[in-house]
Image: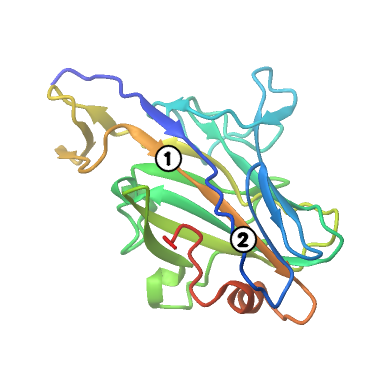
């Protein structure tokens, strides 16, 4: 088969769910980019940025970018902002700012279409189709440092904080992490994630289907039409009275909270 270059449209929409009219016992907030819903003394702002074209500064993340198979390594050489210089890597530098007056526990969620995330069961990231990089701080990963994604000591879900859901009729795998300490008022977290990239083995066959070619085998990516929406969501709860983000989120939003669950 003649090799064809594959282009995917990444619409990394930050879908916010407004939790209004509810009676909360604690000050909480949620955010999905510009839509902030404040209860009591807690307020957050979810920020997404990318490196500008000149490579000299950060700018707001641009939606609807086109993903091409990555050229180079997402784990290789970095620029001055700690972002991979590999071609076709999409910066998606997510942080959360506490814009309220009270310290808060913060949890963030990152959703990937299940059709593009086939490495969860054994968590072989190399088997995924759409990859994401954990956040970085001064050249070091924030994975299970500033952001607690789960522990390998926990056998369930391979140690990940994880659940599956449906968003607008599409199946998603959702990964989430808790910030390691209460976020002080007027402070910003370290990076939650830093970017996404399409696997180098993705192609499109003569029938127009998206496929992935590995070990000499071509596999059709079932249930995928070329549009990848990757929502991000954050919640915050007052720090006072709680020893961890997990305790705070459970108390305020309920156990196994899913921000995209249908009401």
Q: Which residue is mark 2?
A: 20
Q: Is residue 184 above or below residue 255?
A: above
Q: State left or right for residue 13 relative to residue 163.
A: right
In percent of width and height, residue 245 lies at 66, 72
Looking at the image, residue 77 sits to the left or right of residue 127; the answer is: right
**Image quarter in which the C terminus is found:** bottom left
Cα gap from disc 1 to disc 2, whole angstroms: 25 Å
Q: Position of residue 54 (x, y in %)?
A: 68, 17
- Give the image location of residue 139, x and y in percent: 68, 45
Q: Secondary structure at mark 2?
A: loop
Foreground: 27 or 228? 27
Please report the residue visible at 62 percent of the width from the left and 36 percent of the height from the top: 83
* Residue hosting label 1: 229
On screen, residue 239 above or below 263? below
Q: Which mark is residue 208?
A: none
Determine whether 59 is above or below 169 in the image: above
Tell me: 160 left or right of 118: right
Quick one: SS at disc 1? strand
Q: Dividing the picture into quarters, in which one does residue 20 lie?
A: bottom right
- Nearest to viewer (mark 1 / mark 2): 2
Disc on the earlier residue, 1 or 2:
2
- Residue 91 sits in which quadrant? top right
At x 48%, y 28%, the residue is 64
Left or right of residue 109: residue 35: right
């Amino acid at each position: 088969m003649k090799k064809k270059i594959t282009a995917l449209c990444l619409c990394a929409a930050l879908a916010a769910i407004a939790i209004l009219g509810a009676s909360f016992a604690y000050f909480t907030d949620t955010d999905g980019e510009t839509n902030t819903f404040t209860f009591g003394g807690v307020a957050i702002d979810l920020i997404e940025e990318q490196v500008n074209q000149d490579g000299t500064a950060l700018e707001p993340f641009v939606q609807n970018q086109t993903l091409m198979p990555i050229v180079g390594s997402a784990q290789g050489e970095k620029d001055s902002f700690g972002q991979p210089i590999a071609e076709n890597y999409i910066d998606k530098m997510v942080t959360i700012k506490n814009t309220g007056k009270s310290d808060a526990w913060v949890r963030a969620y990152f959703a990937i279409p299940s059709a593009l995330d086939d490495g969860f069961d054994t968590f072989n990231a190399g088997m995924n189709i759409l990859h994401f990089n954990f956040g970085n701080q001064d050249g070091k990963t924030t994975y299970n440092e500033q952001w607690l994604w789960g522990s390998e000591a926990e056998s369930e879900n391979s140690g990940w904080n994880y659940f599956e859901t449906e968003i607008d009729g599409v199946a998603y795998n959702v990964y989430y992490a808790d910030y390691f300490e209460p976020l002080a008022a007027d402070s910003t977290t370290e990076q939650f994630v830093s970017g996404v990239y399409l696997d180098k083995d993705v192609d499109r066959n003569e029938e127009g289907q998206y496929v992935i070619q590995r070990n000499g085998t071509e596999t059709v990516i079932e249930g995928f039409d070329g549009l990848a929406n990757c929502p991000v969501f954050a919640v915050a709860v007052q720090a006072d009275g709680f020893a961890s983000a997990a305790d705070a989120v459970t108390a305020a939003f309920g156990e196994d909270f899913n921000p995209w669950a249908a009401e």
